[in-house]
Amino acid sequence: MECADAATGETRYVICAVGRDDGDYVFTPFGHLADGDPYEAYTPPNGGSCIAD
């Protein structure tokens, strides 16, 4: 779902679990999508490349 970052106000795309409670929808956020290219944002635990050579 599209949300605003609580600290900066920037748009974030949040991964949520969706449930029901007495006919209402309940959204529980548990992560957000990375901005830009995730291959450039992260490295695997061994410090190598995320891209297969």
Image (cartoon, rainbow, N blue to C red):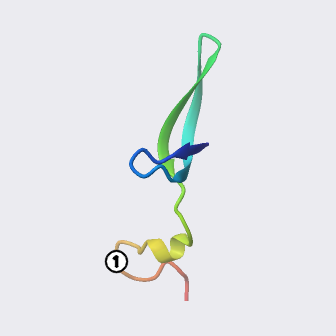
Residue 47, above or below 20: below
Residue 11, above or below 45: above
Q: Locate residue 3, reporting x and y percent.
A: 55, 43
Residue 40 placement, left or right of 22:
left
Residue beneath the point at 59% across and 31% down: 18
Quadrant containing the N terminus in the rendered view: top right
Residue that extends furthest to the left in the rendered view of this protein: 46
Residue 6, above or below 20: below
Give the quadrant of residue 33.
bottom right
Choose between 46 and 36: the one closer to the eye.
Answer: 36
Residue beneath the point at 41% across and 75% down: 43
Identity, as a three-letter code, of the amino acid under mark 1: Asn
Q: Locate residue 37, reporting x and y percent.
A: 56, 72
Q: Which residue is mark 1?
A: 46
Give the quadrant of residue 36.
bottom right
Choose between 48 and 26: the one closer to the eye.
Answer: 26
Q: Locate residue 13, reporting x and y percent.
A: 57, 50
Quadrant containing the C terminus in the rendered view: bottom right
Residue 38, above or below 28: below
Q: Residues within 10 Å of mark 1 (few under 14, many from 20)?
A: few
